[in-house]
């Protein structure tokens, strides 16, 4: 393989890796956002619940906990999810910009 072909192959590999990083990050955001929505639903259900203790699922078992403690745990989880999602979105912007730069260079190879 000559030098030009090798360089084109390396560049295409670099573009593919950058695209994979963007897709992976987007998938992580979707998964965390889904979890955040489930927490939001749980908080809403807690507001309508009029008992002192509620059943909470941890892994494959249910535990009865005080309603206030459960609400606090879910709210802390919400805050952590918000933080993680925001960090991923900030990083995503840089990754998308990098991918766009690589694709612009890629268009120069096609000419």
Image (cartoon, rainbow, N blue to C red):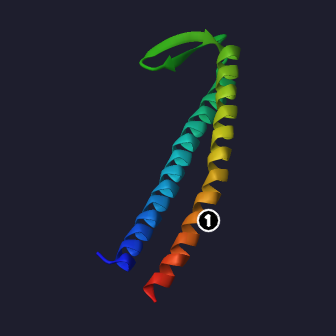
Q: Residue at x 60, y 10 (%)?
A: 65
Q: Residue 22 placed where, x, y %?
A: 52, 57
> Does residue 100 lie above or below 19 as drawn?
below
- Dot 1: few (<14), some (14–19), or many (≥20) neighbours within 10 Å? few
Q: In this picture, is 39 found above or below 91?
A: above
Residue at the spot of label 1: 97
Q: Choose between 1 and 37: the one closer to the eye.
A: 1
Q: How many marks?
A: 1
Residue at the left extreme of this rendering: 1
Quarter location, residue 12: bottom left
From where the camera sits, is residue 73 visible?
Answer: yes
| Residue at screen point 46% across, 82% down | 109
The residue shown at (63%, 52%) is 91
Q: Does 11 sit left or right of 34 as displayed?
A: left
- Horizontal and vertical percent position of residue 40: 63, 35
Q: Residue at x 51, y 43 (%)?
A: 31
């Amino acid at each position: 393989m000559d030098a030009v072909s090798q360089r084109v192959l390396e560049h295409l590999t670099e573009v593919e890796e950058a695209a994979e990083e963007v897709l992976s990050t987007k998938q992580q955001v979707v998964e965390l956002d889904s979890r955040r929505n489930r927490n939001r639903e749980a908080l809403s259900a807690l507001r309508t619940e009029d008992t002192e203790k509620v059943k909470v699922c941890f892994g494959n078992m249910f535990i009865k906990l005080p309603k206030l403690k459960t609400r606090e745990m879910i709210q802390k989880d919400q805050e952590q999810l918000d933080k993680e999602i925001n960090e991923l979105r900030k990083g995503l912007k840089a990754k998308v910009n990098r991918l766009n730069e690589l694709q612009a260079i890629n268009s120069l190879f096609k000419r």
